Image (cartoon, grey):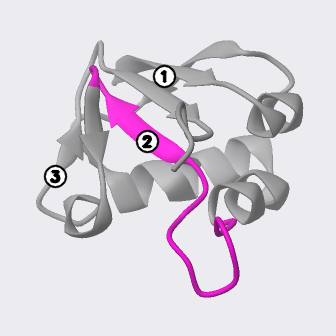
Amino acid sequence: MGKITLICIGEIAEITGDRKTQFEVPTPVTFVELLTFLEANIGENFIRELNKESFPGGSPFYQVLVNGYQVTGDAIGKQNTVNDGDEILISPPLAGG
């Protein structure tokens, strides 16, 4: 088991109930497994909000960073893992386009 820190900004923080939360998870854990864990511990509204699109058919609204590095598309797959001590930041876009 290991500890990860989940930091949420914006509406998704309202769903988690706290801006910064630590979870004890079996590590290493894939992003898919981590999302399943977070859904079970926070609720399906968390996943629904996380999957929100910028506009219909557009890119995801939220950005996900692990230890300061953005995670996108294929990186959220089985070969990529979250490890003990990692920090996951979920935030709306930090700049407009």
Question: Disc number at residue 24?
Answer: 1
- Where disc 3 sits, the SS reads loop
CA–CA distance in space, label 2 to label 1: 19 Å
Q: Which residues are magenta?
A: 52-68
Q: Amino acid at mark 2?
A: Val
Describe residue 68's horizontal placement relative to residue 58 as left or right: left
x 68%, y 25%: residue: 9
Pointer 2 local density, CA inside 10 Å: few below 14, some 14–19, many at least 20: many
Residue 53 falls in image quadrant: bottom right
x 88%, y 30%: residue: 14
Count of numbered marks: 3
- Where disc 2 sits, the SS reads strand
Describe residue 95's horizontal placement relative to residue 84 as left or right: right
Pointer 3: what residue? 80
Pointer 2: what residue? 64
Q: Majority secondary structure of the magenta segment?
A: loop
Q: Earlier in the sequence, mark 2 or mark 1?
A: 1
The answer to whether residue 66 is above or below residue 61 is above
Describe residue 87's horizontal placement relative to residue 84 as left or right: right
x, y percent for residue 60? 54, 64
Q: Nearer the viewer, mark 2 or mark 3?
A: 2
Q: Earlier in the sequence, mark 2 or mark 3?
A: 2
* Camera-side residue of 26 and 4: 4
* Camera-side residue of 89 and 58: 58
